Image (cartoon, grey):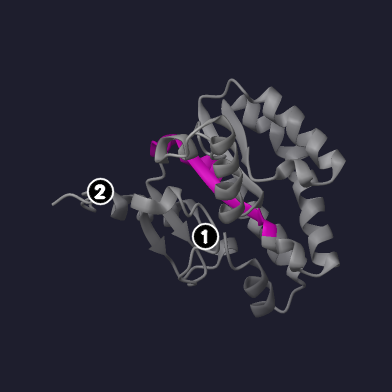
Amino acid sequence: MDGNGRWAKRKHLPRVMGHRQGVEAVRKLVRSVEGMGIECLTLYAFSSENWKRPDEEVDDLMNLMRKFIKSDLPEFIANDVRLKIIGDWQGLAPDIVEMLEDALDQTSKGKNTLAVALNYGSQDEIVRAAKSAAAAGEITTESLEANLDTADLPPLDLLIRTSGEVRLSNFLLWQCAYAEMSFVDVLWPDFTPEHLQAELDNFAIRERRFGGR
């Protein structure tokens, strides 16, 4: 979900306003996916590299996270959404960790999954998975994959990056091995359910061979 800062800059607003509008885009998208046949929607909310941003911006992001969990948890429960967190989320502030643990518990029975990457970096995830696999025995493709943060999620089919940037930025590097990818010019705060549906329609006509002919 890229482009919050540029959205705010173009409108001559503080960066935090871009992040707030980005949260609204998340809400609209999550509310729309039920009828799209999406088993799991994964959102890259806060990367392990985002700690390099100014303290004020990081604080704004953390406060937005607190507000989002408090305000939207009842809606997740009501709509049968299971929350899944990937990344080193237990390294966040203790009150956020407590809120997330409660949210994970309350939504554990949901049939549709919203996975949120918090304090996430794919290289770190792979290293952690390799260490766990090695501690249990031989490192194989299967044993490493079984120790990834996404081990209980379905395979990644489609990765969408907004804002026109054409790179993965340390997101789901292992999982992207055979995923389809789409890089769209729309800034995240302007990304709508209609944009998502257009990407799904395009994905539906792609021919996926997974290395075969």
Question: Can residue 179 be seen in this snapshot?
Answer: no
> Around disc 1, counting alpha carbons within 10 Å, would you say few (fewer than 14), some (14 to 19), or many (20 or more)?
many
Left or right, 52 with reference to 128: right
- In the rendered structure, find residue 119 and report the number of the disc placed on it: none
Amino acid type, label 1: Phe
Q: Going from the N terminus, do you reach mark 2 or mark 1 first?
A: 1
Tell me residue 48's x, y (percent): 68, 57
Q: Amino acid at mark 2?
A: Phe
Locate residue 128: give its quadrant.
top right
Q: Mark 2 or mark 1, which is nearer to you?
A: 2
Above/below status of 207 relative to 34: below
Residue 155 colored magenta?
A: no
The residue that disc 1 covers is 191
Q: Residue at x 59, y 37 (%)?
A: 132
Total marks drawn?
2
Measuring 72% from the left and 30% from the top, which residue is drawn there?
Answer: 103
Q: Which residue is mark 2?
A: 210
88 sits left or right of 173 in the view: right
Q: Which residues are magenta?
A: 29-48
Q: Is residue 161 visible?
A: yes
Residue 134 at x, y = what percent?
Answer: 55, 38
| Label 2: element kind | loop
